[in-house]
Amino acid sequence: MPAHAASLSPATVAVTVGRPEMSPDAPLNEPIVMASTYVAGGDREYGRYTNPTWVAFEDALGALEGGRCLTFASGLAACAAVLDLVGQGNTVVAPRHSYNGVIGQLGDLEARRRGNAVLVDVTDTAAVVAAAEDAALVWLESPTNPALEIADLPAIIAGAHEAGARVVVDNTFATPLLQRPLDLGADLVVHSATKYLAGHSDVLMGAVLTRDEEVYAAVKGRRDLIGGIPGSMEAWLALRGLRTLHLRVERAQTNAQELVRRLTGHRAIEEVRYPGFGGIISIVLSGGALAGDPLTHATHLWVHATSLGGVESTFERRRRWAVEPATIPEGLVRMSVGIEDVEDLWADLSQALDQL
């Protein structure tokens, strides 16, 4: 992280860090470097090890999260690199309502007899800390996806460390603008940069961050070996998106808070789940799946799609995916609130709800 960044607000960091050196006629933005091979004798050597366009994004996100950053081809590639650090036969503790891609990777570890997974209710702090007694890694989401549960990160991190386990926090939903897990003691942070960081539904990319040099070297070693690297264009687009992160998160959060106020008490809705911050809402519809699927096909602005964190508002009934945990209600619809005018969003959503 550049030394001067520590004294800047996150909004200024997002705009300024990761730019080329300011000199006459220098480009204001880091160029897209399309290179698989570099002239020998320097630090780069080969395109699988590094790229100046990746580094610009890594510098900016690292400054925002307060750690060193490594980018990956996708959020799941970043998650896989971290899980690859878990030794043979060791245990990973994770929320039962983790992102289903992570649940799938944990299931794969068990199927290949590489490790064990213990899934916990992340809101039960004592139970999570107790499970960490036999774990090498504690994987946390806060808020969880899609249940939007909140973990007591400081207490769980402290308990896991006392038990000798490392802690990784998926910070995709909160972003470093609303939560900095490394400041709370986490060993690693992971992001699906596809979501809020890039923010325009046109990039697949992931990231891992840490302040531990040994962990950084180990994760980079996995990236070098496996080759789960981002493309130069993806890194450039993600950095361009990051420049407006503070504006997009602020607007999405303001919209979400207003929608939560209007959704609460609607006759078609059994429960509104919102952690109090961010742009993600989950609603549980009284009619279950029979209501959730029609809702997601009855709007004009809200897009029926599985991803989130973009400038546009998207939603879906999560149990339409067979791999979603059975403890997620059939009628739960996860809503990613965008930056459109909230009155337009509400008019579109309310007419669809009124049809149920």
Image (cartoon, grey):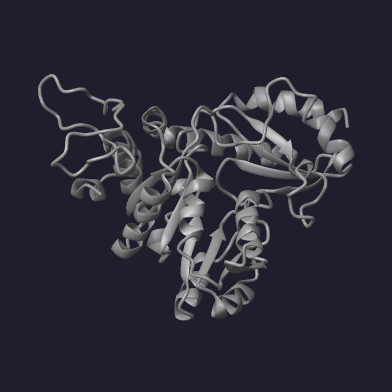
> In screen coordinates, is 331 left or right of 100?
right
**Residue 338 sits in quarter:** top right
In-front residue for pair 190/299 = 190
Q: How many marks?
A: 0
> In screen coordinates, is 322 left or right of 167?
right
> In screen coordinates, is 34 left or right of 293?
left
In-front residue for pair 70/46 = 46
Image location of residue 78, percent across then percent down: 47, 49
Does residue 91 lie above or below 174 as drawn? below
Q: Residue at x 85, y 29 (%)?
A: 354
Image location of residue 85, percent across then percent down: 45, 63
In-front residue for pair 162/245 = 162
**Residue 220 in view here:** yes
Quarter of the image for the C terminus: give it: top right
> In screen coordinates, is 139 left or right of 242?
right
Q: Residue at x 49, y 80 (%)?
A: 163
Image location of residue 79, percent across then percent down: 51, 52
Q: Residue at x 57, y 66 (%)?
A: 114
**Residue 38 sits in quarter:** top left
Q: Residue at x 55, y 80 (%)?
A: 133
**Residue 353 in view here:** no
Does residue 238 lie above or below 90 as drawn? above
Return the residue found at the far left: 24
Does residue 123 lie above or below 170 as drawn? below
Image location of residue 93, percent across then percent down: 59, 68
